[in-house]
Image (tube, coloured by chain):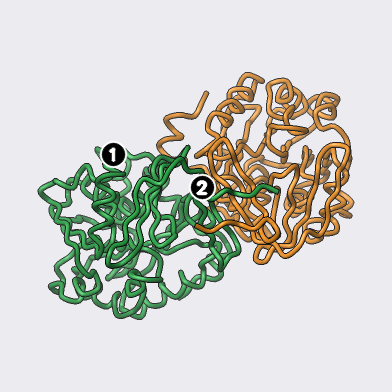
Chain colours: A orange, B green
């Protein structure tokens, strides 16, 4: 049976589901211990560069387009007129780049607790940082939980939570108190969207998130699914939570003629991502 | 960096994309060298039983529903009245079980070259073999390429190719000569469907298949996408090839009220699986 030499492969073991995923590496390009977490950058043989935080794969050059597009465009083509956007986390700046493709957006504030993530991204994923100098963008390195607690009431159209898993620095971004802060900061038609893990192996966590969003006051939830090779199971979700009722706001015409390029997202993919399998229809809460 | 002990993990290295996938195992339950291939069965800690052929993961108890449902129900709810179905490969009998859920189906003939695959499935995946005694089912252990070459012209409604990868025994199921045999055996409204690998890492192979299907005379092609955790990249496709033009035949009403249970498939998922990402729209041939 093959064994993976740790000199030539980076392996992430996902213990709770008894699975592991590996990419073949050529070399470790960088390694830094920030005040918050341990960040490593590898050069892989087939997926470009790879960022790993505390042993967990964050993104690769080759497949991050899936996640970044799906965390940005569905919510921005669901909100009727997104102007003021907040990104919590997102330090690699890939989500920021996608958000800034939307002309309606006038202001994006990104709050990542760890400046080192952005410094590493600037160097090893420069294409994701291509829009960091856009005058509409503000990059803050601060605590996103505190930032949302202090945000002016009803001041934001869209909050995107692009965080690590609910272990370590990301933990406080997956509970009712945080969602209540987001709810208060959103304008009446505002939408929160957050990455919400794998339908196949994290359904309990997804449900916990949905229940907490609902309990925080959000009127309607919509979980979207998409492929994401480098995350456990290769199948991922994000969940939109809308302050007022009604997800019938999908602006299909605008999505079909976005005026910018995407690799994965299009209007049909947006529609398709909302179709949920029978087992999810049966088991999703609330 | 973690290393995976081969006593506790089964690892499949997918060398062409520099990636690997592993499941944690409790024990090897069986191992047999058939005249055609090497078959192993493992008990995993979290995915039930695992079948591996020549070192390549075929299926797990936990996630095979995705693949088997998507190889069966879309094609059967696209054909207007599927009565006579042939399955090439499919020795684990999971596809057969799904096909037999359709009341319109009067006859299913499954031709797998390797009887040992079915014998292993009967023992270690008995739920997939639950319909093997259905009087509408015939299980043959023979060469599927020869079987299709000898099939009566215009005698079949649907051909499902549920094969291993195009290496080893499965190789001859991915070329124009085989597709010409299928074309000849299908009735005028007939449809061929075949698993067509990963959109992210096998696009060349997918295109080769599509070109060969087109060159064999098929009037219209439709590639569907779905998640499949245990296959390379976790993202998979199947491709339908229709003898006459027009895939507008999706029987949505019937799919929405199938009269049987599924875990993944439903009418919305069927529709969603046809939505292709921009990079596929751009690069798919012909």
**Which of A157 and B56 lies nearest the eye of the viewer?**
B56
**How many numbered marks have been drawn onto this rendered protein structure?**
2
Q: Is residue A199 left or right of residue B249?
A: right
Give the label on residue B7, or none: 2
| Mark 2 or 1: the one toward you | 2
Q: Please tell me in which quadrant of the rendered image residue B201 appears.
A: bottom right
Residue positioned 42% across, 46% down in the render? B269
Please state if A243 lies on the left or on the right of A112 as rendered.
Answer: left
Q: Nearer the viewer, residue A18 or A94?
A: A18
Give percent across and percent down for residue B218: 32, 74
Residue A199 versus residue A223: which sits nearer the camera?
A: A199
Q: Quadrant of residue A148?
A: top right
Q: Where is residue B271 drawn, in percent x and y? A: 41, 50
- SS category of the residue bearing label 1: loop
Residue A118 in sight: yes
Are dots 2 and 1 in contact, CB under 8 Å?
A: no
Both labels 2 and 1 in a single chain: yes
Residue B227 visible within the image: no
Q: Position of residue B110 (x, y in %)?
A: 21, 59
Question: On what subunit does the disc labeled 2 rest?
Answer: B
The chain letter under disc 1 is B
Residue indicated by mark 1: B257
């Amino acid at each position: 049976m093959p064994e993976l030499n740790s000199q030539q492969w980076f392996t992430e073991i996902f213990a709770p589901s008894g699975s592991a995923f590996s990419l073949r590496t050529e070399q470790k390009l960088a390694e830094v211990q920030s005040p918050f977490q341990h960040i490593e950058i590898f050069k892989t043989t087939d997926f470009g560069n790879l960022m790993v935080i505390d042993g967990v794969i964050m993104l690769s050059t080759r497949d991050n387009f899936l996640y970044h597009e799906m965390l940005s465009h569905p919510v921005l083509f669901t909100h009727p007129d997104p102007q003021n956007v907040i990104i919590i986390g997102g330090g690699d700046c890939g989500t920021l780049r996608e958000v800034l493709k939307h002309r309606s957006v006038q202001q994006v504030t990104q709050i990542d607790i760890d400046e080192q993530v952005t410094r590493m991204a600037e160097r090893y994923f420069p294409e994701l940082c291509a829009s960091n100098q856009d005058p509409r963008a503000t990059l803050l390195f601060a605590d996103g939980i505190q930032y949302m607690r202090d945000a002016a009431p009803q001041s934001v159209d869209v909050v995107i939570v692009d965080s690590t898993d609910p272990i370590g620095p990301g933990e406080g971004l997956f509970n009712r108190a945080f969602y209540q802060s987001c709810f208060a900061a959103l304008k009446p038609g505002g939408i929160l969207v957050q990455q919400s893990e794998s339908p196949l192996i994290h359904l309990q966590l997804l449900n916990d998130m949905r229940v907490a969003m609902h309990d925080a006051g959000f009127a309607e939830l919509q979980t979207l699914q998409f492929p994401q090779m480098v995350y456990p199971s290769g199948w991922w979700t994000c969940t939109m939570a809308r302050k007022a009722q009604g997800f019938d706001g999908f602006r299909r015409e605008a999505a079909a003629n976005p005026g910018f390029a995407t690799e994965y997202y299009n209007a049909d993919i947006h529609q398709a991502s909302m179709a949920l399998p029978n087992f999810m229809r049966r088991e999703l809460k609330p």
